[in-house]
Image (cartoon, rainbow, N blue to C red):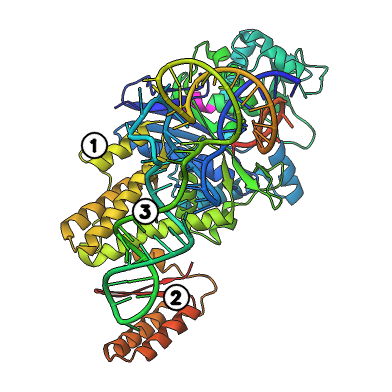
Amino acid sequence: MTIQIYNTMTRRKEPLQLRQPGHVGLYVCGMTVYDRCHIGHARVMVVFDMMVRYLRATGLQVRYVRNFTDIDDKIIRRAGELAISIEALTGRYIQAFQQDMAALAVLPADIEPRATDHIADMQQLIGRLLANGLAYQSDGDVLFSVDRCHHYGQLSGKSLTDLEAGSRVTVNEHKHNPLDFVLWKAAKAGEPYWPSPWGDGRPGWHIECSAMSMRYLGEQFDIHGGGLDLVFPHHENEIAQSEGSVGCHPWVRHWVHNGFVNVVAADGQREKMSKSLGNFLTIEDLLQHYPGETIRLFILNSHYRSPLDFSYALLAAAQAAMDRIYGALRAALPLTGDSPCEPVAEPLDQSDRETKRFLQAMNDDFNSSQALAVLFELVRQLNSAVTQRDRALACAMTGQIRRLGTVLGLVNTDVNSWFQRRPSLAAIDAAEIERLVCQRNEARQGRRFAEADQIRQALTDLGVILQDSASGTSWSWQR
RNA sequence: GGCCGGGUGGCGAAGUGGUCUAACGCAGAGGUCUGCAAAACCUUCACUCGUGGGUUCAACUCCCACCCCGGCCUCCA
């Protein structure tokens, strides 16, 4: 079964073609670290994490590179505002990023390079571009000459003439073409700089991704990803400068972009969530209300290329869906024992109908939405198995749910801790709850139902939900 | 203005020439179970896929027009 993957360059799904069979080189444009991550960032990270997990689950060897942009105008400005060093600022937000990713079950990339550690690589590329006549110096800057690039505009489906006609870029004296972009910026007073053959300065934004991706994946590689908003100009420029410097085409085989997260405003209008619009919610904010897995399910419930509207109501629905999965696993616990969780040690095969359908969905441009549907079918089967007290089937289904869930980065939590994650405002602790549950069960055994109901009501008022079953009473915090 | 996406039930969201009288989740209704609940299970919940034409034996799925929404063309995931 081949994996079909949508290529922004050709605007169609294509079979995944690897330069080296069995090995995938993947580069994703990461964060500019000057603030907390918002849900838009969460989406890119979760989506590509899901892809990496899946590619690995099919037996492919993936080398995943995701960078940190740790030098740029916004970082410099922000550090100035906070009166701290750039290193302190970027260090702080890299740490915050890693915390957020851990909560979302996003695995670290294999290599997480920082721009400032690759200045020499960038300078080398810039030197080659100058030597190849594709770049020029002007007032201490080094600029890329888009007119010298035949393919310019191919990725974003734009032509140079269209771009110039509709250009909002102000005409700049020292640019040959208004669309020329900076490779190396001359140092300004008070800003950090590095020495270079063209004078002191710092790199332009786009060159870092060319330098770091080629550094770790070679001059040509398989997949380059990022948010849809990076298609133009960032990725367009990366292609121009990369192909121009190393002289290979195509530089990258597959271009993969995820859709935006939109925010629905009070008036019903939706718009892209972004830093510049100031309408963003941070992952940290969301984690106050819901576990990371719920946010992850919310993201993976729609296809990665579709727009995704965010609201707390939608997140609540995702929470209910997660509870359904964990609810089934919990109900099965008395039958299956504590940890029938099978690690994904071996590549997924098509041994059963559900796994086959799961693979088919994921092979079709990572259709996580359909894959999730398979997961929920397994959940129903597990519930039935538990009702029928079919231990073998319950164990099998539990294993399947854990196994396929892991491929999506879901179902990572211990069942009881999922339901017993204590809300911050809770006025009662677990020991006290257990004590009351026992007391109530004694009352029930003595058929003193009024007393039992009274205890249950008291717990309900404190936000604790009870469920009686043949194998005992379980409790959860109210959502 | 140029260029891209998209409009599917109460909500979210798959599907994209016949298997679709449309997956899956949330919410709702009825039933089973339960001391009562809850959960679970069963049944039910779009004769219909923005609107109007066209192509076809057959369209939600292809083509045309129109309406509406979002995005890119500037930093942005």
Tell me the magenta residue range. Answer: A212-216
Residue type highlighted by circle 3: Val
In the rendered view, does A398 fall on the left or right side of A277?
left
Q: Earlier in the sequence, mark 2 or mark 1?
A: 1
Task: Name the spot of residue A147 as percent of width and height, x first.
Answer: 68, 10
Q: Closer to the N terminus: mark 3 or mark 2?
A: 3
Q: Nearer the viewer, residue A6 or A67?
A: A6
Q: Are marks 1 and 3 on the same chain?
A: yes
Residue A459: x and y in percent read: 45, 81
Q: Position of residue B2 (x, y in %)?
A: 70, 18
* Side of A83 where B61 appears, left or right: left
Residue A365: quarter of image = top left
Residue A81 in sight in this render: yes
The residue wearing badge 2 is A464
Instruction: For mark 3, name the chain.
Output: A
Residue kind at label 1, given as amino acid type:
Asp
Query: How far apart in space, not on screen, are marks 3 and 2 (Cα)?
Result: 23 Å
Instruction: Provide the chain ID for the residue under circle 2.
Output: A
* Label 1 sits on residue: A349
User: Which is nearer the eye, A83 or A222?
Assistant: A222
Residue A194 painted magenta: no
Image quarter where the N terminus of chain A lies is: top left
Residue holding disc 3? A411
